[in-house]
Image (cartoon, rainbow, N blue to C red):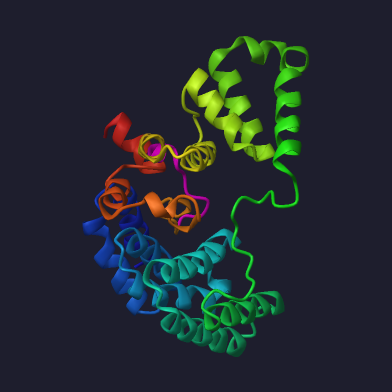
């Protein structure tokens, strides 16, 4: 059964989600929580948000069955994204309450229980209560400070890394990474305009956010769909780049057709297989 689930995830990541999804749904129905996490991601991209809640609830109720915290965090954010897309806060609240009940019965870690309690307050308040929804991660630093830090780091490159500075691709990717580290979206956009797109998906997402913030949504989408093959799962249960659905700046440009385009694009290990052949 586990082999079938692993193979189904591989099929989904290869772009043939219609073939792999039924197997994952069946595994979820049998109580496999890792399958629940995978289905939640696909359903999010399919726009089936009213159904996403149940899969997220399964993951949040039994987080110990998931190997990486990243997947649990994504389940939390997918549930919140469901509220953004459907405004169905009551269903979200019931899903969180169920997850909290299960988590308590299985003696989940106190920190996780505390997170669920805050999430329940957040959903019951229909988003009015404070909850740490990641927007850019640099709220404590001014834009001016981020800009100066980025410019200083870029200016020092020829002295600190002379060999790197001479190689165009390495220099471009390093400067993109600096823009991401310092949270300077305008810097990423400038590098893109002068040197082309980055070679990592994290930097692609950061650049796309910068383009959206600049009012260049079409350019942001072109960067995203070109960069999707670069995405790689942190955990084997992950099948799609959920960042595109849970980021407050990006989810607004992810139309139904664009989400399907992402699902149909080979990515991660399967991108490597599809590009090299059998």
Instruction: Determine the main secondary structure of the stretch shown in magenta.
Output: loop
Q: Which residues are magenta?
A: 227-236
Judge whether 87 appears above or below 262 on screen. Answer: below
Instruction: Locate the C terminus and report the quarter of the image it occupies.
Output: top left
Instruction: Decide whether residue 278 is among the magenta residues.
Output: no
Residue farthest toward the front in the current orientation of the protein: 215
User: For residue 230: magenta?
Assistant: yes
Q: Position of residue 7 (x, y in %)?
A: 32, 55
Instruction: Name the residue rendered at 58%, 37% in the picture.
Output: 185
Image position of 97 with respect to 255: above or below: below
Where is 109 relative to 225, above or below? below
The reply, left or right, for residue 251 in relation to residue 154 is left
The percent coordinates of residue 88 (x first, y second) are 40, 78
Quadrant position of residue 167 = top right
Q: Nearer the viewer, residue 107 or 87?
A: 87
Question: Height in image: 190 above or below 133?
Answer: above
Closer to the camera, 229 or 81? 81
Please report the residue visible at 27 percent of the width from the left and 46 percent of the height from the top. 261
Quadrant of the image for the N terminus?
A: bottom left
Residue sitting at x 40%, y 54%: 252
Give the side of residue 2 with respect to residue 186, left or right. Answer: left
Report x, y in % for residue 183: 65, 40
x%, y% of residue 145?
76, 37
Q: Is residue 67 left or right of residue 244?
A: right
Residue at x 44% of width, y 55% of height: 242
How many dots with numbers? 0
Q: Quadrant of residue 68?
A: bottom right
């Amino acid at each position: 059964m586990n082999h079938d689930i692993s193979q189904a995830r591989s099929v989904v990541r290869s772009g043939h989600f219609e073939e792999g999804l039924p197997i994952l749904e069946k595994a979820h129905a049998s109580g496999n929580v890792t399958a629940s996490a995978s289905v939640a991601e696909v359903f999010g991209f399919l726009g089936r948000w009213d159904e996403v809640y149940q899969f997220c609830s399964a993951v949040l109720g039994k987080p110990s069955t998931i190997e990486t915290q990243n997947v649990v965090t994504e389940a939390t954010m997918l549930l919140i994204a469901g509220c953004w897309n459907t405004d169905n806060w009551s269903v979200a609240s019931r899903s969180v309450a169920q997850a909290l009940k299960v988590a308590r019965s299985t003696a989940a870690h106190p920190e996780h229980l505390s997170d669920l309690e805050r999430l329940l307050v957040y959903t019951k308040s229909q988003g009015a209560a404070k909850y740490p929804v990641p927007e850019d991660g640099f709220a404590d630093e001014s834009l001016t400070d981020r800009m100066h830090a980025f410019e200083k780091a870029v200016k020092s490159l020829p002295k600190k890394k002379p060999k790197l500075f001479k190689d165009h691709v390495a220099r471009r990717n390093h400067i993109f990474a600096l823009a991401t580290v310092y949270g300077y979206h305008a810097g990423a956009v400038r590098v893109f305009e002068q040197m082309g797109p980055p070679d990592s998906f994290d930097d692609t997402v950061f650049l796309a956010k910068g383009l959206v913030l600049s009012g260049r949504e079409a350019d942001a989408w072109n960067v995203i769909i070109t960069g999707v093959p670069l995405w790689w799962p942190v955990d084997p249960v992950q099948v799609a780049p959920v960042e595109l659905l849970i980021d407050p700046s990006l989810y607004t440009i992810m139309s139904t057709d664009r989400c399907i385009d992402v699902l149909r694009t080979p990515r991660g290990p399967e991108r490597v297989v599809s590009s090299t052949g059998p």
